[in-house]
Amino acid sequence: MKKLLLVISLIFFTASSSFAELSNLGMTVISDDNNLFGLKNSQGCITVEPEYKKIIRLGKSSWIVQKRNKYGLIDSDGNVLIEPRYRHVDRILTKYVKFGNDINFGIYDEKGDAILAPEYSSINLLFGGMFLTCKNYKYGVTDMRGKILLENKFDDIYMPKPNIMRLKYNGTWYEIEQVAGGTFTIPEDVQNIENNSDFRVSSFINSPVAASGYSAVTFTDYILKLFASISPAHEETIDELMFSQGADTVSIFMRFAWLPKYPFTYAKKYYYYVRTPNNGPLSIIKDNLKRKMAD
């Protein structure tokens, strides 16, 4: 319920701030009796007929739109830049947009040009103006222009601090700390980073638990880790069935129209988390077995 109230308050806040921003662009959002939205320019001419459930500004010239339950991108004249065919959307830093379904997430600019091709199962922001990408269960890093900094070869990547990056490769965790400068920046010659005096590279092969965040050390604990996937699977199911629908969140919740789909969607999400080979609940068992076999 707290999450629901937070989403509702954010909707109202975003709506009020968006209208204030629109006046500076000479564009005004209009609506019809069916609560569908369009655009009108400063001369009072309708440039986009009210046919969208949502319309959200992107950059200075484009708009994220929702038609039925799918998202796309148009410009201020109503030209379709990206067809509404995606279930998920996320505006990033007000000038980028992430579209995707399950395994085809991509990043686009306000012109509809792909910064990152729609071929990733997930894309998230990192410190230092970088994107963390995941493809075929392997993680990599790109910059904001789409340049690949680290290829999708790593089992896991995360940054606990702005100047520290932790990477899991072939079951072993490595920590790269930038000891000189501010926010973490991957050097051009990343292959020889161990010889770079601006960075400190260390590994903790003997203590993978500290890096991964898992505290399981017994067979019983490993079994319990299976249940650790319940929460993220549940939250992603709710996001897909409720909060990504784009209609009024309260009415969706009260109608419970999403309930029949819940078991199937949840099973799909849970199965994905459990079978993730490199950083899922059972990955520690596999890594330990690999190390024992190598000894």
Image (cartoon, rainbow, N blue to C red):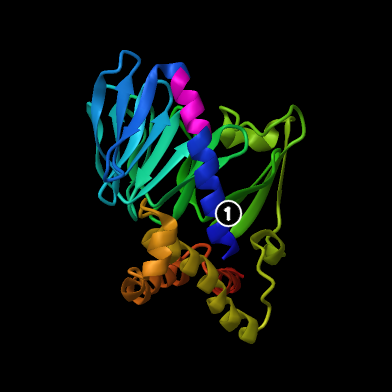
Q: Does the magenta stretch include residue 19?
A: yes
Residue 50 image point, x, y percent: 25, 35
Q: Is residue 203 left or right of residue 170?
A: right
Looking at the rendered structure, the secondary structure element under dot 1 is helix
Span colored in magenta: 17-23
The percent position of residue 269, horizontal first and vertical second, equals: 41, 67
Q: In which quarter of the image is residue 290?
A: bottom right
Residue found 34% across the figure and 47% down from its top: 100
Name of the residue lying farthest toward the right: 179
Residue 61 vs 276, above or below: the answer is above
Asked if one can make out residue 97 in the rendered structure from this viewpoint, the answer is: yes
Q: Name the residue under label 1.
A: 6
What residue occupies the far top of the structure in this picture? 43
Name the residue located 55 percent from the left edge and 41 percent from the top edge: 13
- Location of residue 165 by image quarter: top right
Work out which residue is located at the far front of the displayed protein and give it. Answer: 33
Q: In which quarter of the image is residue 116?
A: top left
The spot of residue 271 in percent (x, y) is: 40, 72
Foreground of the two, 15 or 153: 15
Which residue is nearer to you in this view: 42 or 3? 42
Residue 134 in view in this figure: no
